Amino acid sequence: MYEDALSAYRRAGRIAAEVRRQASGLVRPGVLLAEVCEMLEGRIKSLGAQPAFPINVCVDEIAAHDTASVDDNREIPNGSLVKVDIGAHVEGYLVDTAVTISLNRELDHLKEVAEEALRKALRSVRPKVRAGEVGGVIESTIESYGLIPVKNLSGHQISRFTVHTGKSIPNVRTSLGPKLGLGEVYAVEPFVTTADAAGEIEGGSRAEIYRMIKERYLEDRDARELLSSISRDYKTLPFARRWLTRCLEKDRLNDVLNDLISSRCIAQFPVLVERTQKPVAQAEHTVLIRENGCEILTE
Ligand SMILES: [Co+2]
């Protein structure tokens, strides 16, 4: 990897780790979800990076892809299990890291097991290891504590300006799977739920996060201008609906976003919910594959 790419990854990694530590102190019952998102996104910027995607704040059975909506008045609930997922990039070199904050003693073990599964998985990451083998480490660690992984969520390879690319790292043992390569960057992210859960997420009815698929000329002026500012500001990275209220007022924005989805210029990421509504914990780091193992960029 080129030296300037490596230093950009490391810088993004240090910033994301700092923001993750701040997230752990910030998430308390009664705090507005919007405040958590906006404060942490502001912190990424003030530290000299840009958000690689909106801060995700996912409560209890919501596993991924939730963030504050426009005019969101939801509070962090008492007794909940909260995942905060953070993406930061420097010049498009991005990292992805997450932490679970347990506000319920009875759910603390889900957080701890997700972290333990991540630690063990990262010890198995090295050049030429099969993705399925890393998944096996995650699965057997989680099951050794009487919990189960969420099997249809996985870690992912990262490239410049692209959060999910190339190969995946499953959270369960799979036969073989691709080999991880020297110099590649991956987010490894075990998701843990209770043994009586389905251990599967499904797309919910809401979406707050989108990304551009392709830019093209559109007849509608609002749609054309919105798409061009999305392309300029976020390129192919995910963005939040609430980030666009500076462009259009709420109702018009929703209509234009729906038009951009129909014309396949943007795609939405529905909120992902555990199918049996059981609480989900997550731990995540981004790593660079080195000769003898991996460098944790977000430690
Ligand atoms: Co993440």
Image: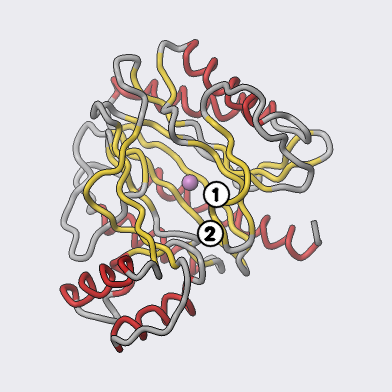
Kind of residue indicated by mark 1: Ala
Q: Is residue 41 above or below residue 291?
A: below
Q: In this view, does 188 lie above or below 184?
A: above
Comparing marks 1 and 2, which lies closer to the viewer? Answer: 2
Q: Quadrant of the C terminus?
A: top right
Q: In which quarter of the image is the N terminus?
A: bottom right
Task: Give x and y (percent) for residue 229.
Answer: 41, 81
Q: Is residue 69 above or below residue 165?
A: below
Residue with the mark numbered 2: 88
Quadrant in the picture for residue 197: top left
Task: Give x and y (percent) for residue 255.
Answer: 21, 72
* Residue at left offset 22%, top offset 70%: 254
Quadrant in the picture for residue 160: bottom right
Label 1 CA crowd tier, 10 Å (few <14, some 14–19, many 20+): many
Task: Give x and y (percent) for residue 128.
Answer: 77, 33
The tag earlier along the polypeptide, 1 or 2, is: 1
Q: What element carries label 1?
A: helix
Q: In this view, does 57 lie above or below 144?
A: below
Kind of residue indicated by mark 2: Ala
Mark 2 CB in 8 Å range of ligand 1? no
Q: In this view, does 99 lie to the left or right of 79?
A: right
Residue with the mark numbered 1: 17
Whole-angstrom CA distance, mark 1 to mark 2, is 10 Å
Task: Give x and y (percent) for residue 63.
Answer: 35, 38
Q: In this view, does 44 lie to the left or right of 82?
A: right
- Colouring of the image: secondary structure
Q: Is residue 128 left or right of residue 57?
A: right
Q: In this view, does 227 lie to the left or right of 78?
A: right
* Residue at left offset 41%, top offset 28%: 150
* Residue at left offset 61%, top offset 46%: 157
